[in-house]
Image: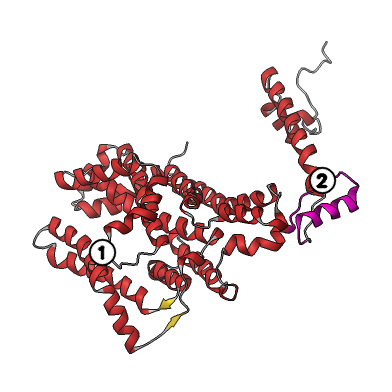
Amino acid sequence: MADTAFVRDKMLAPQKAPSSEVGALRWMRENLFSGPLNTILTLAALYFVYVIVATIGPWLSRSVWNASTLQECRAIVEASFGEGKKGACFAVINERWQQIIFGFYPRDLYWRPTLTMVLMLVALGPVLFTWVPRKLLWFSFAFPAVAFWLLWGGTVWLPVAILLAFGVAYAAYRVLTPVNGLLGIVAAIIAPILYWLYLCAPLANVLETALPFGLRTLQSHEFGGFLLSSVIGVSGIAFSLPLGILLALGRQSDLFVVKTTCVAFIEGFRGVPLITLLFVASLLLNYFLPPGTEFDVILRVIIMVTIFSAAYMAEVVRGGLAALPRGQYEAADALGLDYWQAQRLIIMPQALKVSIPGIVGNFIGLFKDTTLVSFISLQDPLQLVASIRANQEWNGIYWELFIFVGLLFFAFCFPMSRYSMYLERKLKTDHR
């Protein structure tokens, strides 16, 4: 017993952890097979995935990309893989992808919507990312007018005259605010509207006469496909957020007139289906305009979509405002900030941070809802898919077209979802 050591006098060499405790096996054991129920659900899901892959995999593996008709596609599949075999006929995408994306936009002018998309990414840079130079915000502000001019064409002076309305609004606000704050706000809203109605077009005509410069003018019936959905969706997203913020602030205002107007606006438009508003924009709105007035149908749809989305956006932002503790408002008062300074520097940044998931969810829903314009005879991607399927050459084709359109919408909506997650992580200040 005297020679027995109870304390190890030699270190053992390090050994690898059991394979079941590291890597993929550990993750599977903890997440997929952690109990009887999870094991059953995992096996059922694996079987479901196997059935889908076993069904769709061969169909995709026999894809045909070069053919002029559906019958030719089927003949190629049977010649290559045997009689009775079926395969995907993606040749329809190869033949009609330009129509699905650009609609009836003239082929020789495809550079205009392409350039507009590139400029949109440039304009979004300083809005979405802090490392982009702030000076580009001026271009972000002017981009809607630039996009309008590139897509519809016409004189360059019309978008310039439209942008001057913001200078009119600022001048009215600065002149009348010292007299009365509410009067300044009302004037900043009414002045640009009156300018757009009565002075914008004459001023553009005068400038065009003095310095003519423009692009070939296009009509709304030449728009279609994913281009149409992008124009309506991006415009609705860009304009509904600031309008929704103003409506949310107005709903919390102590001024009876402002609060009542905002509540009536929000509840009124939230209680009406979007498709009803689209029919109003397409059919009924002309009855309330002066005789001979030409109001572009796409512009009408954009206005209705923006108003509808802004009503929902206002409630999302109001939820963020309600989530802030009262101490944040008291802290702003203690610092001596006025109302707009408090909203810009303290209240609204925190409210928007809380509201990010709801705001982005609204944006994604709005972009997908642009397909509803097919009910008012606008040629959105789904309407064009129906037209292609009605063509004798492609009569009978189905999944390939909808897969392509679905991928287009996914390519637009998925980055929005990822950006919202990036923004939430970036703005996260707690350590939970």
- Rendering quarter of residue 111: bottom right
Above or below: residue 413 compared with residue 178: above
Of circles 1 and 2, which is in front? 1
Residue sitting at x 82%, y 50%: 62
Which residue is identified by label 1?
290
How crowded is the residue under tag 2: few (<14 C-alpha within 10 Å), some, or many (20+)?
some
Counting from the top left corner in percent of width and height, residue 289 is at 28, 61
Does label 1 or label 2 sit earlier along the sequence? Answer: 2
Q: Residue 240, can we see it?
A: no
Marking on residue 86: 2
Vertical position of residue 368 compared to residue 39: above or below: below
Outermost residue to the top: 1
Q: What is the distance, in whole Å, between disc 1 and disc 2 at their CAs? A: 58 Å
Residue 305 position, x and y percent, is 40, 52
Q: Is residue 312 magenta?
A: no
Q: Nearer the viewer, residue 167 or 26?
A: 167
Q: Is residue 342 left or right of residue 45?
A: left
The residue carrying pointer 1 sits among few (fewer than 14), some (14 to 19) or many (20 or more) residues within 10 Å by Cα, namely few
Cβ–Cβ below 8 Å for labels 1 and 2?
no
Indicate the amino acid at tag 1: Pro
Query: Over which residues does the magenta segment extend?
Result: 68-91
**Helix, strand, or loop for circle 2?**
loop
Colour scheme in use: secondary structure
Residue 19 in view, yes or no: yes
Task: Name the outermost residue toward the left.
Answer: 179
Q: Residue 101, position in %: x, y?
A: 59, 61
Left or right, 319 with reference to 151: left
Which residue sits at x=80%, y=18%? Answer: 5
Residue closest to the eye, 306 or 32:
306
